[in-house]
């Protein structure tokens, strides 16, 4: 089909997925229109995914890429304590991709995740590129006024928590680099084999939307950030914005047994993956001591684990292992590192 037929089909897919609170005019016009709700703020995030930088076409599936394009932005909204509402998605593809089934599968993965969290596609753009695929994802969320959770709210004495497991996505990336490929029908459920499970943690991350909403609406988190660059780097980001230090306990880091097993067979260090791996898209948050007892054990089946404590800025960001304490330097992903 031609470009305009494709866009017409995409508009129909978006419109057939029900109404959205606050949306006046969705996909189909030159711009979307939505009404700001009383006592609510709009939270906006955007992410780029570039072929051969953020993904490789030969190591993922189009539906998984569509899922990830939305998931990374949902994770940012969750890290603000907000509820995701609307999405705009722009994509530029090569002619050979356009003439394949790629885009249909890409949007299938996108819409499957969007439906799970009640996110409405309200616009975007489609263009051609001569070499690499480019994906631009924008998500708008809604949050009760003054309930946003910023990186800047941590205080000495606050307890540090993370959701889920750390290092899964980094282990999955190492497997991809060594030639492993996800099976065509693999899902993200735990009963899948260990290699597919870790590959999907890299290729099909799960944003912790439920945790983010709860921590924001119930005012449980004093600060929060999602772990996209790696625990060591993102903890530094949070501490810098809050003007504090931190002490992380190595023995408390939640490392999946699957990661430990895979690392043991492939001479990888699970602690290094957990500290510096990145792309887990778990939430890193702090809780004042008086609110710790209010934390639920699980949200949407995902636990949160205490991994340390916020300290004074003068103490720096450190990690302890038994009696040994050393500086935890940021070692996660940097786009322009040497």
Image (cartoon, rainbow, N blue to C red):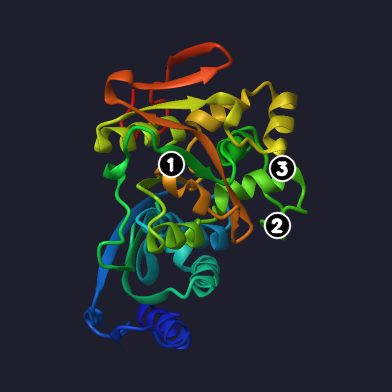
Dot 2 crowding, Cα within 10 Å, few <14, some 14–19, many 20+ = few
Residues under labels 2 and 1: Cα distance? 34 Å
Q: Is residue 79 left or right of residue 180?
A: left
Query: Where residue 189 is drawn, which disc sits there?
Result: 2
Residues under labels 2 and 3: Cα distance? 12 Å
Task: Identify whether 149 is placed above or below 16.
Answer: above
Query: Where residue 195 is drawn, which disc sits there?
Result: 3
Q: Are marks 2 and 3 in contact (CB under 8 Å)?
A: no
Q: Which structural element holds mark 1?
A: helix
Q: Which structural element holds mark 2?
A: loop
Q: Quadrant of the C terminus?
A: top left
At 44% from the left and 49% from the top, the residue drawn is 291
Quick check: can you spot residue 293?
A: yes
**Mark nearer the N terminus (1 vs 3):** 3
Dot 3 crowding, Cα within 10 Å, few <14, some 14–19, many 20+ = some
At 43% from the left and 63% from the top, the residue drawn is 213
> In front: 179, or 272?
272
Task: Identify whether 69 is placed above or below 233.
Answer: below
At 45% from the left and 35% from the top, the residue drawn is 230
Q: Which structural element holds mark 3?
A: helix
Q: Which residue is mark 1?
A: 289
Query: Where residue 275 is drawn, which disc sits there?
Result: none
**Mark nearer the N terminus (2 vs 3):** 2
């Amino acid at each position: 089909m031609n470009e305009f037929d494709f866009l017409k089909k995409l508009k129909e897919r978006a419109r057939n997925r029900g109404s959205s609170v606050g949306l006046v005019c969705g996909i189909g016009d030159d711009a979307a229109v939505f009404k700001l709700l009383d006592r609510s703020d709009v939270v906006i995030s955007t992410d780029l995914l570039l072929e051969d930088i953020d993904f490789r076409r030969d190591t993922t599936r189009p539906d998984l890429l569509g899922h990830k394009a939305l998931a990374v932005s949902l994770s940012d909204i969750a890290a603000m304590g907000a509820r995701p509402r609307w999405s705009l998605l722009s994509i530029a593809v090569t002619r050979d991709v356009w003439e394949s089934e790629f885009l249909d599968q890409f949007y299938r993965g996108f819409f499957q995740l969007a439906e799970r969290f009640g996110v409405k596609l309200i616009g975007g753009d489609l263009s051609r590129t001569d070499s690499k695929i480019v994906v631009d994802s924008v998500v708008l969320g809604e949050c009760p006024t003054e309930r946003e959770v910023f990186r800047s709210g941590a205080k000495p004495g606050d307890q540090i928590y993370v959701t889920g497991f750390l290092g899964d996505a980094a282990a999955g990336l190492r497997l991809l680099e060594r030639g492993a490929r996800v099976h065509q029908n693999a899902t993200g459920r735990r009963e899948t084999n260990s290699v597919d499970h870790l590959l999907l943690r890299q290729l099909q991350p799960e944003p912790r939307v439920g945790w983010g909403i709860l921590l924001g609406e119930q005012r449980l988190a004093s600060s929060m950030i999602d772990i996209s660059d790696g625990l060591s780097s993102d903890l530094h980001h949070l501490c810098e914005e809050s003007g504090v230090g931190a002490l992380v306990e190595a023995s408390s880091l939640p490392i999946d047994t699957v990661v430990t097993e895979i690392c043991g067979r492939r001479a990888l260090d699970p602690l290094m993956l957990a500290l510096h791996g990145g792309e887990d898209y778990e939430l890193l948050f702090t809780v004042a001591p008086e609110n710790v007892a209010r934390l639920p054990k699980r949200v949407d089946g995902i636990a949160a684990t205490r991994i340390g404590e916020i300290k004074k800025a003068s103490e720096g960001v450190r990690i302890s292992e038994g009696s040994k304490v050393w500086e935890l330097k940021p070692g996660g992903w940097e786009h322009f590192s040497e």
